[in-house]
């Protein structure tokens, strides 16, 4: 599978609890944190749910 890099560019403060937990499940904590993950259908769905908070780059 292809690797993608995700970066949290907007804060999760004042976001619904579901979005906060999705960002946490992706392995992101503070703003500016990055993580390289495999591009699986499950991860793609999680990214799609919070895409307005993330910056996604293919590696």
Image: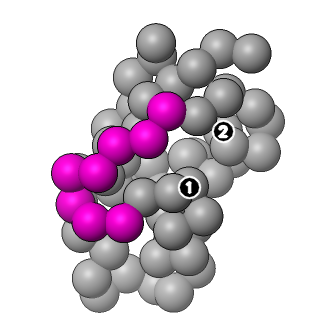
Earlier sequence position, callout 2 versus callout 1: 1
Q: Is residue 34 magenta?
A: yes
Q: Is residue 48 above or below residue 38?
A: below
- Res 43 → quadrant: top right
Q: Which residue is mark 2?
A: 44
Residue 57 at what x, y percent from top left? 39, 23
Question: Does the magenta stretch mainly form a helix, a strand or a loop?
Answer: loop
Q: Secondary structure at mark 2?
A: helix
- Tell me, what colour scheme is on the image? one colour
Q: Is residue 25 above or below residue 42?
A: below
Q: Which residue is mark 1?
A: 26
Residue 38 lies left or right of residue 51; in this view the side is right
- Res 25 → quadrant: bottom right
Residue located at (51% from left, 57% from top): 27
Q: Is residue 50 above or below residue 44?
A: below
Q: Which residues are magenta?
A: 29-36
* Neighbours of disc 1 within 10 Å: few (<14), some (14-19), many (20+): some
Q: Is residue 51 magenta?
A: no
- Res 39 → quadrant: top right
For residue 11, the mark is: none
Residue located at (42% from left, 58% from top): 28
């Amino acid at each position: 599978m292809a690797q993608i890099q995700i970066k949290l560019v907007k804060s999760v403060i004042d976001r619904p609890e579901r979005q906060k937990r999705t960002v946490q499940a992706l392995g992101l904590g503070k703003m500016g944190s990055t993580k390289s993950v495999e591009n699986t259908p499950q991860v793609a769905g999680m990214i799609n749910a919070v895409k307005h908070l993330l910056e996604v780059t293919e590696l």
